């Protein structure tokens, strides 16, 4: 089954390769390379957000699948 995460990771892989090719052809400071780098950053941010939201949901419960009580909450 293809998931959104797998699609996103494929896009990141392709965008990274594209950015490396543009950097090699045009240089690191060329506007095309910079724009591609910014697009890669956006994809990476989406992946990070996806991973944070999916892992946050799994950390909210104990072994019994009950929400954590205030006494078990971690305070920073």
Image (spheres, rainbow, N blue to C red):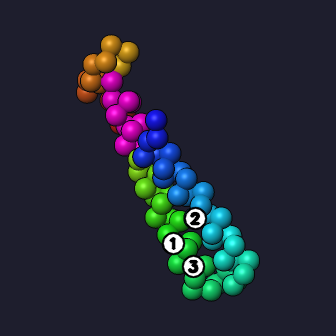
**Side of 30 relative to 41 (left or right):** right
Kind of element beneath mark 2: helix
Q: Are marks 2 and 1 in contact (CB under 8 Å)?
A: no
Kind of element beneath mark 3: helix
Q: Residue at x 42, y 46 (%)?
A: 4
Give the Cα distance between marks 3 and 1.
6 Å
Residue 13 coordinates in the image, percent (x, y): 60, 57
Say if 68 sits above or below 2 in the image.
above
Highlighted range, magenta: 52-61
Q: Are marks 3 and 1 in contact (CB under 8 Å)?
A: yes
Instruction: Give the dominant element type of the magenta stretch: helix, strand or loop.
Output: helix
Q: Dot 3, how many residues are within 10 Å of its Cα: few (below 14), some (14-19), or many (20+)?
A: some
Q: Residue at x 48, y 60 (%)?
A: 43
Q: Residue at x 53, y 78 (%)?
A: 35
Q: Which residue is identified by label 2?
A: 15
Which one is in front, 64 or 27? 27
Q: Dot 2, how many residues are within 10 Å of its Cα: few (below 14), some (14-19), or many (20+)?
A: some
Tell me the quarter of the picture where residue 17 sits.
Answer: bottom right
Q: Which residue is identified by label 3?
A: 34
**Side of 24 relative to 16 (left or right):** right
Q: Dot 1, how many residues are within 10 Å of its Cα: few (below 14), some (14-19), or many (20+)?
A: few
Q: Is residue 57 magenta?
A: yes
């Amino acid at each position: 089954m293809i998931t959104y995460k797998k699609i996103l990771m494929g896009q990141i892989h392709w965008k990274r390769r594209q950015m490396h090719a543009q950097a090699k052809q045009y240089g690191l400071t060329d506007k095309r390379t910079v724009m591609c780098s910014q697009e890669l950053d956006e994809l990476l941010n989406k992946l990070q957000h996806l991973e944070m939201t999916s892992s946050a949901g799994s950390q909210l419960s104990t072994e019994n699948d009950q929400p954590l009580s205030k006494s078990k909450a971690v305070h920073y």
